[in-house]
Every structure is written in structure tokens, then in C-alpha cells.
């Protein structure tokens, strides 16, 4: 969860928290889920070069931020999300976990980046 609480390291190679380039020239995504550290690798050869692998890693990290509850709650402003849901879908009880709320907006083709904290 430190990537949520801190600014990017000055030596960040990706410009995205939780996305790094390792010595083996693979982009890695790191995150915590259910108290355990997770990692997924994106091979430069498999994804058509450095930029393709980097973009796949960044996309995966964004998906993690939207779907893992601890990240979603920390990164998205619940008040803004609920206001947008009320505007798009109507007044309801929006006490569901943040990933479910974000999924509803994504189903409606709503850009959720504006709803970040």
C-alpha cells in the first residue's frame, strides 16, 4: 500500500507507482492483495518491445487499482463516485465496496479518472 501513500521515487523508470523495469528487461507490476505481495511480469519479447510491455504493465496496474478493494477505496473519492452514480443511474444505496461501484460506472462508459482523489 506504500505506493498509494507516497510520491513516485525519483528514479522511477515507468512514471507509474508499482510498475518497474527489472534487470532481465521485463516490466513488473507489484501490489498487495489480502495481505500478500503479488507480482506479474510483462516480457518485452512477448509484448512486442519495451513500449508494448510497459503499456501492458501500466494497464494491468490501473486494473488492479480499480478492482482490489484497498486500492480502490484509497484512490477514488467515494463522494465523487456516488455523485456520478446518482447522476447516471439514479438515487440508490451506494454502500457497496468501491470496486463494485467503479464497475457500474465502467459499464456505463464513464471515464473514472476524474473521480480519483
Image (cartoon, rainbow, N blue to C red):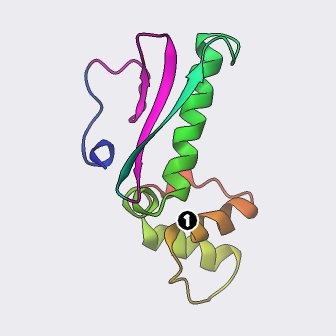
Residue 33, magenta (yes or no)? yes
Q: Does residue 24 appear left or right of residue 101 in this picture?
A: left
100 above or below 23? below
* Image quadrant where residue 110 sits: bottom right
Q: x and y percent of residue 21 in the render? A: 44, 18
User: In the depicted view, which residue is nearer to us: 25 or 61?
Assistant: 25
**Residue occupying the point 58% across, 47% down:** 63
116 above or below 43? below
SS category of the residue bearing label 1:
helix
Q: How many marks?
A: 1
Q: Which residues are magenta?
A: 11-34
Q: x and y percent of residue 48 in the render? A: 70, 13
Q: x and y percent of residue 3 in the render? A: 32, 42
**Residue occupying the point 30% across, 31% down:** 8
Residue most extreme to the front: 36
Residue most extreme to the right: 108
Counting other residues with Cα less than 10 Å from the Cα at mark 1, is it few (<14), some (14-19), or many (20 or more)? some
Residue bearing the label numbered 1: 99
88 above or below 93? above
**Residue occupying the point 60% across, 36% down:** 59
Q: x and y percent of residue 47 in the render? A: 69, 18
Image quadrant containing the C terminus:
bottom left
Residue 106, magenta (yes or no)? no
Q: Does residue 15 appear left or right of residue 3 in this picture?
A: right
* Image quadrant where residue 74 sits: bottom left
User: In the depicted view, which residue is nearer to us: 94 or 28?
Assistant: 28
Amino acid at each position: 500500500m506504500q505506493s498509494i501513500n507516497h510520491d513516485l521515487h525519483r528514479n522511477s523508470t515507468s512514471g507509474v507507482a508499482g510498475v518497474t523495469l527489472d534487470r532481465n528487461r521485463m516490466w513488473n507490476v507489484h501490489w498487495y492483495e489480502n495481505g500478500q505481495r503479488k507480482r506479474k511480469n510483462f516480457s518485452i519479447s512477448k509484448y512486442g518491445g519495451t513500449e508494448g510491455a510497459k503499456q501492458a504493465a501500466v494497464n494491468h496496474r490501473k486494473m488492479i487499482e480499480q478492482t482490489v478493494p484497498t486500492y480502490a477505496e484509497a484512490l477514488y473519492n467515494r463522494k465523487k463516485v456516488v455523485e456520478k452514480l446518482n447522476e447516471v443511474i439514479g438515487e440508490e444505496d451506494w454502500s457497496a465496496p468501491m470496486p463494485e461501484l467503479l464497475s457500474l460506472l465502467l459499464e456505463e462508459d464513464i471515464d473514472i479518472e476524474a473521480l480519483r482523489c
